[in-house]
């Protein structure tokens, strides 16, 4: 888990930080927060799907509505798992779940 989380931080810092910010707070009314995020905790499959395939349309995170476009990031299943392991365990997020490439591979595009 520690190695995956470390890899996830590197990916986050290179790819995700532009929109979700270094502290995971996002940008009010534009990009949802990942910090203390009910989206990561309660919508695991949707979280994986959004990283893997992008996201379009309205979502609600921590009671706030967001309607932005997130482009597909072009990450491998292992990289998506690493990002999930990192973001699910920082900024007040706590998860006992260990995300794997195998689990991510089973999440299909809608």
Image (spheres, rainbow, N blue to C red):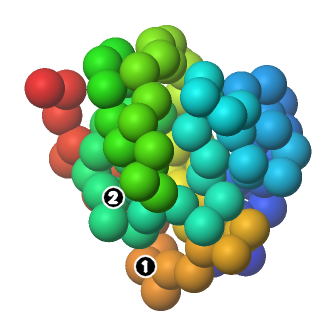
Dots 2 and 1: beta carbons under 8 Å? yes
> In the figure, is residue 4 to the left or right of 76?
right
Element carrying mark 2: helix
Of label 2 and label 1, which has the lower sequence position?
Answer: 2
Element carrying mark 1: loop
Percent position of residue 44, x then y: 33, 58
Name the foreground residue: 83 vs 24: 24
Q: Residue at x 43, y 79 (%)?
A: 97
Q: Which residue in the protein does label 1 denote?
A: 97
Q: Is residue 40 visible?
A: no
**Quarter occupied by residue 17:** top right
**Quarter occupied by residue 89:** bottom right
Residue 21 vertical placement versus 1 (above, below)? above
Marks 2/1: CA–CA distance: 10 Å
Percent position of residue 39, x then y: 41, 55
Q: Disc 2 vs disc 1: which is toward the camera? A: 2
Q: Residue at x 47, y 57 (%)?
A: 62
Name the foreground residue: 76 vs 96: 96
Q: Which residue in the protein does label 2 denote?
A: 44
> In the figure, is residue 72 to the left or right of 14?
left
> In the figure, is residue 89 to the left or right of 78?
right
Q: Residue at x 13, y 26 (%)?
A: 110
Residue 2 vertical placement versus 53 (above, below)? below
Crowding at dot 1, Cα within 10 Å, few <14 / some 14-19 / many 20+, comes out as few
**Quarter occupied by residue 87:** bottom right
Q: Residue at x 81, y 38 (%)?
A: 21
**The disc label shown at residue 9, or none:** none
Residue 63 vertical placement versus 58 (above, below)? below
> In the figure, is residue 30 to the left or right of 59?
right
Q: Is residue 10 visible?
A: yes
Name the foreground residue: 49 vs 91: 91
Q: Residue furthest bottom?
A: 96
């Amino acid at each position: 888990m520690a190695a995956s989380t470390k890899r996830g931080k590197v990916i986050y810092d290179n790819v995700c930080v532009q929109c979700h910010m270094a502290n995971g707070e996002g940008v009010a009314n534009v990009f949802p927060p990942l910090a203390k995020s009910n989206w990561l905790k309660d919508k695991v499959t949707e979280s994986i799907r959004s990283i893997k395939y992008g996201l379009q349309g309205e979502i609600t995170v921590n009671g706030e509505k967001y309607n932005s476009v997130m482009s597909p990031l072009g990450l491998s299943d292992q990289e998506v798992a690493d990002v999930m392991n990192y973001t699910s365990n920082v900024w007040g997020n706590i998860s006992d779940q260990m995300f794997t490439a195998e689990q991510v591979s089973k999440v299909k595009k809608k």
